[in-house]
Amino acid sequence: MIVNNKARQWKPNATVAAIIERDGRFLMIEEETPDGLRLNQPAGHLERGETLLQAVARETREESGWLFTPRGLTGIYLADAQDGDITYMRFAFHGDAAPPGSPPRLDEGIVAVHWLAYEDIAAQTARLRSPVVLQCLADYRNGIAYPLQLISDLR
């Protein structure tokens, strides 16, 4: 019996996240999820035809209104969803952001945009969208930074 290997091929969901620090505080969004209100970095899925850098800038703008300029890659993280059916591959970028020029129109489900100290975020681990949120921040604080030249888009 021949089995179609393509039908069984595993593929993670590619996501991006922005780590933005100003005056010792991090830009975080508060969003409605099936599990209640959660805190996250501005983050979301890579869309067809986008580069990773375009995706993280778009997601940051859509979820916070801030205009993000990536300066480096903090890390690449694999994490399973709580139900275990989905694996996410998160590309976390750090960089700078400019405030919105006018009141932003945020994605549906975004309740608020906050600037929070690391200690305040760490004190709310039960409210984080996933453990990856705090890991990304910890890695950034520990100076992990890869150049954007690490990423090549050959399409």
Image (cartoon, grey):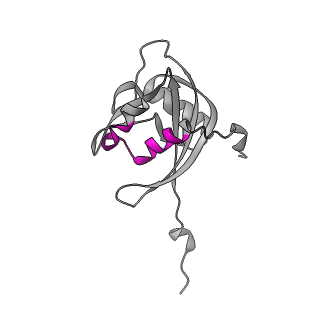
Asked if residue 25 is positioned above or below residue 32 in the image, the reply reads above
User: Where's residue 1, x and y in %?
Assistant: 53, 87
Please state the total of marks drawn on the protein image. Answer: 0
- Which portion, as a residue range, is magenta? 122-139
Q: Is residue 125 magenta?
A: yes
User: Where's residue 90, x and y in %?
Assistant: 52, 47
Residue sitting at x 51%, y 70%: 8
Dominant SS type (magenta): helix
Q: Which residue is farthest top?
A: 102
Q: Is residue 105 magenta?
A: no
Asked if residue 102 is positioned above or below residue 51 in the image, the reply reads above
Residue sitting at x 36%, y 41%: 128
Left/right placement of residue 104 relative to residue 37 reads right
User: Toward the viewer: 119 or 135?
Assistant: 119
User: Where's residue 17, x and y in %?
Assistant: 51, 38
* Residue 150 occupies quadrant: top right
